[in-house]
Amino acid sequence: RKEVEQDPGPFNVPEGATVAFNCTYSNSASQSFFWYRQDCRKEPKLLMSVYSSGNEDGRFTAQLNRASQYISLLIRDSKLSDSATYLCVVKGNAGGTSYGKLTFGQGTILTVHP
Amino acid sequence: EPEVTQTPSHQVTQMGQEVILRCVPISNHLYFYWYRQILGQKVEFLVSFYNNEISEKSEIFDDQFSVERPDGSNFTLKIRSTKLEDSAMYFCASRAYVSSGNTIYFGEGSWLTVV
């Protein structure tokens, strides 16, 4: 089983659409969870952290289900500028030398068209 | 916003040559990382560095690779005897001490092409 697994996509949606990405992770001891955004040939940029209580940042909502080891990202009212690859990212165990190491999913490509 | 800077942005090198990729982490950060991304593939962890020593490394980070923080500001990745399969984007990242928050900041990357 892959450490972090995402919907393969790609997703091709019209402006204004709502789109949801899913992700699962294999290490139940993982401590922190994130969604990153990556534009073509650019560095990953933090979109938002993901908390068990769920969190929202404008049009973006992230959810974490630790029991199912499942993470989701919902984008409402998609904009052309949302076109990018969305990366599900998990950070290792607290303490020791694994703290800080990020494990990335393969990424899901989103294209928002007019 | 503070940023991690990397040089060069793009380097082409002959197979078998040595390459040094340079990074200037954010000034008050204490943890440093190198990641790489082969074209079309996922971002992969290479190595983490703290207190002037490697704290963790992946299976990818074999004897061909080394890291150094020579002068307290730069953080370098050296790749010896490059191979075609080393062609990738290499990202440097840094993080402040854990009590200052957990955000990891990435540089814009150095694109390495081995020919």
Image: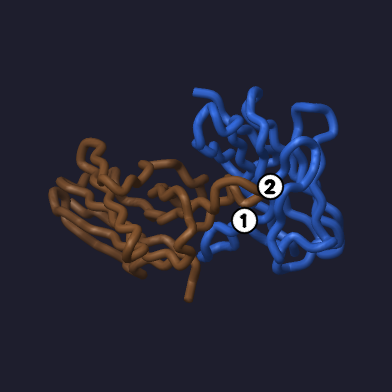
| Colour assignment, chain A | brown
The quadrant the C terminus of chain B occupies is bottom right
**Local crowd size for mark 2, using a 10 Å CA cut-off: few (<14), some (14–19), many (≥20):** many
Which residue occupies 54% across, 53% down? A92
Which residue occupies 81% across, 64% down? B15
Residue wearing tag 1 = B45
**Local crowd size for mark 1, using a 10 Å CA cut-off: few (<14), some (14–19), many (≥20):** many
Q: CB atoms at circles 2 and 1 under 8 Å apart?
A: yes
Asked which quadrant contains residue A64, the reply is bottom left
- What amino acid is at disc 1? Phe
Q: Position of residue A17 (x, y in %)?
A: 14, 53
Q: Is residue B35 left or right of residue A48?
A: right
Q: Which chain letter goes with mark 1? A: B
Q: Is residue A52 left or right of residue A101?
A: left
Q: Position of residue A51 (x, y in %)?
A: 33, 45
Picture disc at residue B48: 2
Look at the image and name its color scheme. by chain
Q: Which chain letter goes with mark 2? A: B
Where disc 2 sits, the SS reads strand
Which residue occupies 62% across, 51% down? A98
In this view, the residue in front, A102 or A41, is A102
| Colour assignment, chain B | blue
In this view, the residue in front, B22 or B68, is B68
Q: Is residue B94 left or right of residue B12?
A: left
Q: Is residue B27 visible?
A: yes
